[in-house]
Amino acid sequence: MEDDERVGRTVVQLLREAGYAVDLESDGAAGLIAFELEPVDAAILDVRLPGLAGGGVELCRSIRSLSTEVPILMLTAIAARATIVECLDAGADDYLVKPFHVDELLARVRALLRRAPTALPPQVRVGSLILDPSRHSVERLGRTIPLTPKEFSVLEYLMRRPDAIVSTGELIDHAWDRNYEGYSNVVPTYIRYLRRKLAVQGAPDPIVTHRGAGYCVPSDV
């Protein structure tokens, strides 16, 4: 949630380019409603957020009262110690002073997701596939495979649920965002891209299609 529309759009673009599904709210009250309705892996809040008397700090307290597990990163243009202490006391896990560097924002988001109580190991291994989010790299049978951010996001979601059948709707919810209104074949298209890039002669298909149900990465791939 960000009060400055320009900054908000920039943050959203940076996170989406890094492969994250992102929803943006510019109002604290709307942000709280969105949090109550939609599952989120992390929240980024601006301190000076309209819609609530206490701004982003009040929203942070409200989110923390609903969940002790969701990581919260506060963005603030105020470097004063009192403001930082207020954010941390309200339940924030970290803070970042504006203006910030792109690499630092992304590194802090990755760190928060790694520290979350429900977080899985940073490096994911499923059969012959090795995925490392911190390096944004994928390997199979010793070969490094370049992927776009969206391809990486789809594969990571599948690999963190080996043998589980993941529906098209679930992939859209986690790899895109709730406002996605693109073409309906987007998931099959990206699955096709991934199969083509991950294919190794003589090795099994890394992604299995269960018609009418979804897709999975077998643990013995």
Image: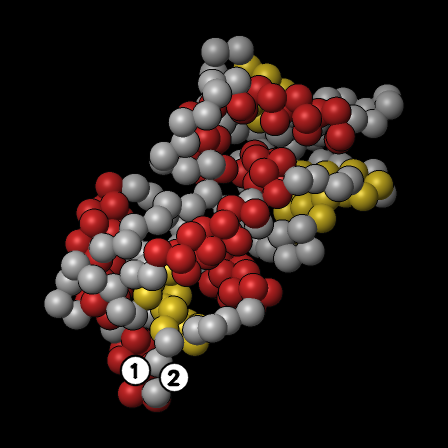
Please give the name of the residue rendered at 66% of the width and 21% of the height, measured from the top-left corner: 192
Amino acid at pointer 2: Ala
Q: Name the residue under label 1.
A: 83
Q: Spot the residue most to the left.
A: 53
Which residue is at the front of the view, 210 or 127?
210
Colour scheme employed for the rendering of this structure: secondary structure
Q: Could you say where residue 188 lies in the image, as x and y percent from the top left?
A: 57, 20
Return the residue nearer the eye: 202 or 82: 82
Q: Looking at the rendered structure, which numbered label has been put on residue 182?
A: none
Which quadrant of the figure contains the C terminus?
A: top right
Tag 1, which secondary structure? helix
Q: In which quarter of the image is residue 143?
A: top right
In the rendered image, residue 1, in percent from the top left (x then y), is placed at: 32, 57
Q: How many labels sit on residues?
A: 2
Q: Confirm or deny contact between disc 2 and disc 1 (CB under 8 A).
A: yes
In the rendered image, the vertical position of residue 15 relative to residue 78, given as above or below: above
Q: Where is residue 173 in the image (x, y as percent from the top left)?
A: 41, 34
Distance, label 2 to label 1, CA atoms, is: 7 Å
> Which mark, residue 79?
2
Q: In this view, does 121 lie to the left or right of 50?
A: right
In the image: residue 28, left or right of residue 182: left
Q: Which residue is drawn at 49% across and 27% down?
A: 166
Amino acid on which the number 1 mark rests in the picture: Thr
- Residue 124 lies, in percent from the top left, at 64, 47
30 lies above or below 113:
above
Quarter of the image where one finds residue 38: top left
